[in-house]
Image (cartoon, rainbow, N blue to C red):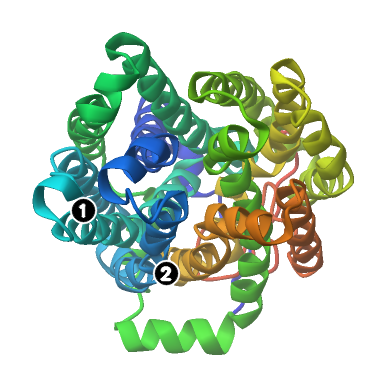
Amino acid sequence: MTDQPAPEPTTEKVESSTLRRAISASAMGNMTEWFDYGVYAYATTYITAVFFPQAGTAATLLVFAVSFVFRPLGGMVLGPLGDRLGRKAVLAATIIMMAAATFCIGLLPGKDAIGLWAPALLILLRVVQGFSAGGEYGGAATFMAEYSPDRKRGFLGSFLEFGTLAGFTLGALVVLGTELVVGPEAMADWGWRIPFLLAGPLGIIGLYMRSKLEDTPVFQELEDEHAEEKSFAAEFKDLVSSYRRPLLALGGLVIALNVCNYTLLAYMPTYLENTVGLTSQASLTVIILGQVAMMLVIPFSGRLSDRFGRKPMWWVSLGGLFVLAVPMYLLIAQNFALAIVGFGVLGLLYVIQLSTISATFPAMFPTQVRFAGFAIAYNVSTALFGGTAPYVNERLIGITGSELVPAFYMMAACAVGAVALLFVPETARASIRGTGVPGVDTEVKPLHPTTS
């Protein structure tokens, strides 16, 4: 379907106070989600001792990956619901499920207390997390993009990824801070539970912030025109028949994005401890410093994408990571100080693509299939290549004996992302309103609005 040139979008007229609340609510929910994932990744050593004392670290990382298997199911259920019932209702449900599951992990007895029920219940709660995450990120990014003015979608959308990094960083800080306060022995005994329990109040705050917002102006306009998909079956048929190309292209970009993301942010502490030989505290310090630097850069990178386009930013990131992955991993293996430098360089290159995804991915689909198209493609690719990255890296290092496995894995993922990027239209400043494909069927605005 091809739209006629659209009038000025509703999103351009959103009051600044409402826009700030929408950005804050989206970022807060995303922060809660990634705090939950980050705490699990950064407490891997303690979780292994409590739930998998015989199986070891690989079992803990495999359970980390298990939750990602259920993300596509969450995307397939919650994505179409978000396109038919609205973004707000689904986002309220996802933050409740995520925070409640993480909180309950903090209450679980260990294997010594209840035997195999302990790892079984841990897996069940990770499944709930995976299902909820399947709707959370696609919904939050769609919510953010549809509230943002077209000319500032990259800049404002980058704050969702600021929330992602804030969640990972907060998770690392809480795990490190708890360990420093209670000591290693108490941390292994009961202190590891504290970071998981903190997810409860974080979820309540995020839910409160989201409850104070109306649904996005773009979705409300779709409702007013009665242009929503009529059923789940109709939406899936429309996606497969009419939007196969963006589904595949988004999946390819997500391979690059999430292999780099989970190799750098989730697996790096385990890599630094098990392979490089740093202490738990030293490895978390490396991660925290690197992620703080990434958080400082991300809004500026998002603004640059509004000026120069999303695709040039992706080319710089993919090319830089491909060329520098091996040299930086060689640097990381030397000592603590050089590990900070190597991780920082890779993190800053990665953040260039991370800063644009909340603006890029929702704009690959029209409004009536946006949530579902994004959620399904994103989560299928993430389940296959993102959540499995820590486990795959650990296993391949064990099989090959090469400490450069994570670098090679990132390089391969970036090559896949580069091929996918060739088939993605530029959507910077393109309207995402209506039932046309952004950047193809909708108008692209000049960088600076003209006045009559």
Instruction: Please say if the residues under marks 2 and 1 sit with CB atoms less than 8 Å apart.
Output: no
Q: Secondary structure at mark 2?
A: helix
> Dot 1, how many residues are within 10 Å of its Cα: few (below 14), some (14-19), or many (20+)?
some
Q: Residue furthest top?
A: 181
Query: Based on the displayed image, in which of its 4 quarters is residue 204 positioned?
Result: top left
Residue 235, above or below 275:
below
Compared across the picture, whether 237 is left or right of 248 comes to: left
Give percent across and percent down for residue 344: 71, 26
> The N terminus appears in which quarter of the rendering?
bottom right
Q: Secondary structure at mark 1?
A: helix
Give percent across and percent down for residue 418: 80, 61
> The C terminus appears in which quarter of the rendering?
top right
Q: What residue does disc 1 label?
A: 93
Q: Amino acid at mark 2?
A: Ala
Give percent across and percent down for residue 331: 81, 29
For the point 52% across and 86% down, the residue is: 240
Q: What residue does disc 2 label?
A: 372
Residue 384, above or below 51:
below
Compared across the picture, whether 439 is left or right of 115 comes to: right
Q: Amino acid at mark 1?
A: Ala
Query: Based on the displayed image, in which of its 4 quarters is residue 231 positioned?
Result: bottom left
Q: Earlier in the sequence, mark 2 or mark 1?
A: 1
Residue 382, above or below 423:
above
Q: Residue furthest left?
A: 114
Give percent across and percent down for residue 423: 77, 70
For the point 35% across and 72% down, the residue is: 73
Foreground residue, 1 or 80? 80
Residue 217 appears in the picture as rendered: yes
Residue 221 appears in the picture as rendered: no
